[in-house]
Image (cartoon, coloured by chain):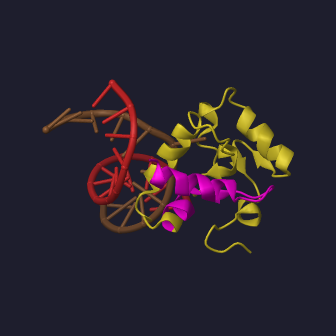
Chain colours: A yellow, B brown, C red
DNA sequence: CAGTTGACACCGT
DNA sequence: AACGGTGCCAACT
């Protein structure tokens, strides 16, 4: 079925609270570093999936909340990240490097 | 069945 | 350093 997406979901769900990851990191984890776009696609479908995907923990390589527009409210993603303890400013994670979590290198 | 899109990333200018 | 254009894989129309 969604073998590809399922793997992406598994990674996203593996993101610890207060941490975030990038599309490139996930794409590389699934074995397709060039398929970063697929990660975004999977997260787009994540809303249709039964499983709850913390898409707010996934940002682009710049640490910018690129998908905030996809949430119910444009501020929902930022609010959620702030709840996790992540500092977000101007739709961008301030200490992105500090909260960045690599699926291939969990600590 | 074929064409276009898509929450990105990387290289070149 | 910043901006623009190209490349990638799979799904959607």
Q: Position of residue B9 (x, y in %)?
A: 48, 60
At 67% from the left edge and 26% from the top edge, which residue is drawn?
Answer: A72
In magenta segment, residue A86: no
Nearest the eye: C13 or A52: A52
Q: Please, is residue A11 above or below residue A107 in the view?
A: above
Point out the image quarter for the C terminus of chain A.
bottom right
- The single residue placed furthest to the front in the displayed view is A1
Q: Please, is residue B1 above or below residue A12 in the view?
A: above
Q: State which quadrant residue A35 falls in.
A: bottom left
Nearest the eye: C12 or A86: C12
The stretch of residues the image draws in magenta is A1-28
Q: State which quadrant residue A15 falls in.
A: bottom right
Q: Is residue A48 left or right of residue A31?
A: right
Q: Please, is residue A91 above or below residue A21 in the view?
A: above
Nearest the eye: A28 or A47: A47
Give the number of marks.
0
Q: Position of residue A2 (x, y in %)?
A: 47, 48
Q: Is residue A103 left or right of residue A1?
A: right
Q: How would you classify the magenta stretch by its main secondary structure? A: helix
Q: Position of residue A75 (x, y in %)?
A: 73, 32
Q: Position of residue A58 (x, y in %)?
A: 64, 51
Nearest the eye: C3 or A3: A3
In magenta segment, residue A27: yes
Q: Is residue B10 left or right of residue A47?
A: left
Q: Is residue A63 at all visible to an observer of this figure? A: no
At 47% from the left edge and 44% from the top edge, which residue is drawn?
Answer: A41
At 76% from the left edge and 65% from the top edge, which residue is drawn?
Answer: A98
Q: Is residue A74 at all visible to an observer of this figure? A: yes
At 59% from the left edge and 35% from the top edge, which residue is drawn?
Answer: A47
């Amino acid at each position: 079925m969604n073998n590809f997406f399922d793997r992406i979901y598994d990674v996203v769900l593996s993101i610890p609270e207060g941490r975030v990851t990038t599309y490139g990191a996930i794409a590389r984890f699934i074995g397709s570093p060039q398929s970063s776009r697929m990660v975004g696609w999977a997260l787009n479908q994540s809303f249709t999936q039964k499983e709850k995907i913390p898409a707010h923990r996934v940002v682009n390589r710049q640490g910018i909340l690129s998908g905030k527009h996809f949430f119910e409210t444009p501020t929902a993603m930022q609010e959620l990240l702030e709840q996790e303890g992540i500092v977000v400013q101007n739709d961008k994670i301030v200490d992105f490097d500090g909260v960045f979590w690599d699926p291939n290198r969990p600590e």
